[in-house]
Amino acid sequence: MRRILICLFLFYSILLFSQEFIFTAKDKPNDDGSAILIEWDASDYEPDKIILERQDTKGNFLEIKKLSDFLGVFEDGNDINAGKTYFYRLSLYDVVGNLISQKSAQITAEAQWFNTEKISLLIMTIILTAAIIYFIYSARSGKELYIRKISGLESMEESVGRATEMGRPILFIPGTLDLDDMQTIAGLTILGKLAQKVAEYNTKLLVPVCRSMVLSTAKEVVEEAYLKAGNPDAYDPDSVFYLTDDQFGYVAGVDGIIVREKPAANFFLGAFYAESLILAETGFASGSIQTAGTAMPSQLPFFVVACDYTLIGEELFAASAYLSKDPHQLGSLKGQDLGKAIFVIVLLIGVILEIFNVHILKDFLSLH
Amino acid sequence: MIQFFEAFGIWLGAFFTFAIFSFLYKDNPVYKIAEQVFVGLSAGYWFVYTIFSIIIPNLYNPITQNFSENWIKIIPAILGVMMLMRLIPKTSWISRFPISLVIGTTSGVLFLRYLKSDVINQMTATMINPFIGGSWVEIIGKLMLVIGTLTGVVYFYFSKKHEGAFGSTARIGIYFLMISFGAAFGYTAMARISLLIGRLQFLLGDWLKIIGP
């Protein structure tokens, strides 16, 4: 009997020790050192309960997760800092609550310099930047860079001429967003060109704005334009003025200006939201020539409907290069065009590969 | 007293709603009052909001309460003061530095963001096999997606004149854009109608009590 019991004990012990229990802690790759990956496989044991614990600063193990699956990966991103070492413990319990097995692991969280999952973004950045620099140097060296006609911009000369003839002002709205939006910057660049023409014709310009930073920049731009036009005395500092930061308060103010001042031409160039139709409709009702441009897809329909000329999306950004013929802007636009050509080619190749069930290109480009 | 102010607020709201609606007839003094009050109040509101919700919690409190950990916030504070230099004509040139910094950093940060969202993500989302899927409607939809994206990009290519085959492709692109604009117009017009309904609910419910809440 005693022998049988010893044999049974040995058999059970061998069986228990032959079971595999995998528990590893790894630093999460391609991150800023703020996450640890915990991997476990306790499928041989089939425990009732799996508890994952992490050691705190006092040396106590605190439960961080009850794991429901026998194997898997858990990402611990709670209060993990790069350069610090963390201790983990995984405990397996049976139905009664007895500890079957336990393993611990330690890992130091590390921040990576490069996110290798974004290589495609790096490649695109390098290609675009190189193309832009190349074209800027080409334009500087005197090489003529062709840009097709942007029909919306033909209105500028016509608008200024009309305003001069009628003795009415020109209204320019640089959108309702701040300087941290590219559309506002593009709008202000066009404002510079428009103000230069306005200064040449000695016409009145009105630029109501709704952001303090835009106010400062617009004042600078208009003043410089008057200087360039050789008519600095005609510059009126009050022609660029602040109304309010509030979206609809600003619209109410601009509508009042349109109705009372009756500008001969309105320019809405920048980022717009729900105010686009209100502004464009009021301008249309007052009989102004209207030119609008925005990269807000949801607002473009209203401008297309209510304005005489519309710069659609990227035409707004191309407009300043088209008007100024400045080598920097021309080079930048040309570089972007090269990017678009690459986009079309890569997209076509990608679609063909997808048709043949080859996903290598799509997988490479997908950003995680 | 509270009830009086509640009722006063509702009457004031109704008055200003009618004042704004009166613009549908023509510009008039009542509309002008509503407009000026709105612009003035909102300007004042944003001024106070900037102080109490931006400057005090993000600059004043961190610096006064824990300077050693928040000293870096002195830099934006200095940039803000540099912006105010515009008020003095002789020193107004100083404000160009913070403006340059904002424009430069914006361009740099947005370059990568848009390259990711508008170029690479757009590209991978369009890389599909249009011929797999359920019904023929789905297949046509996928083909439209691919053709619309390609021709749309061609329209925005500025280095070549829109003529010949290239021009035809660009024209198809602009048709796609116009159709999408039409759909967006209808969708937003519906949303505007809901704003009008909201105003009418206020007038008929909160003000006149003709309809229930």
Image (tube, grey):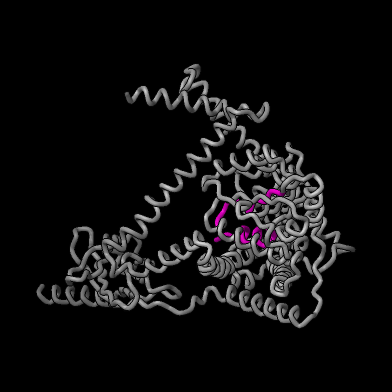
- Nearest the viewer among A28 and B37 is B37
Q: Is residue A307 above or below residue A103?
A: above
Q: What residue is drawn where x is 64% and y is 48%?
A: A298
Q: Where residue B35 sits: x, y (%)?
A: 56, 35
Residue at x 75% of width, y 62% of height: B156
Q: Going by the image, does A175 lie left or right of A56?
A: right
In which quarter of the view is residue A249 placed?
top right
Residue B127 is a magenta residue: no
> In the image, is B134 to the left or to the right of B93?
right
Residue A311 percent coordinates (x, y): 73, 55
Residue extending furthest right?
B164
Residue B106 in the image: above or below residue A271: below
Residue occupying the far top of the picture: B210
Residue A187 forms part of the magenta stretch: yes
Q: Which residues are magenta?
A: A170-192
The location of residue A250, given as percent across then percent down, is 57, 44
A79 on left or right of B183: left
What residue is drawn where x is 80% and y is 44%?
Answer: A166
Task: Using the rendered image of the protein, determine whether residue A199 is visible from the camera's viewpoint.
Answer: yes
Q: Which quarter of the rendering shows the N terminus of chain A? A: bottom left
Furthest residue in direction left, as rendered: A2
Q: Nearer the viewer, residue A235 or B107?
A: A235
Is residue A136 found left or right of B213 in the rendered image? Answer: right
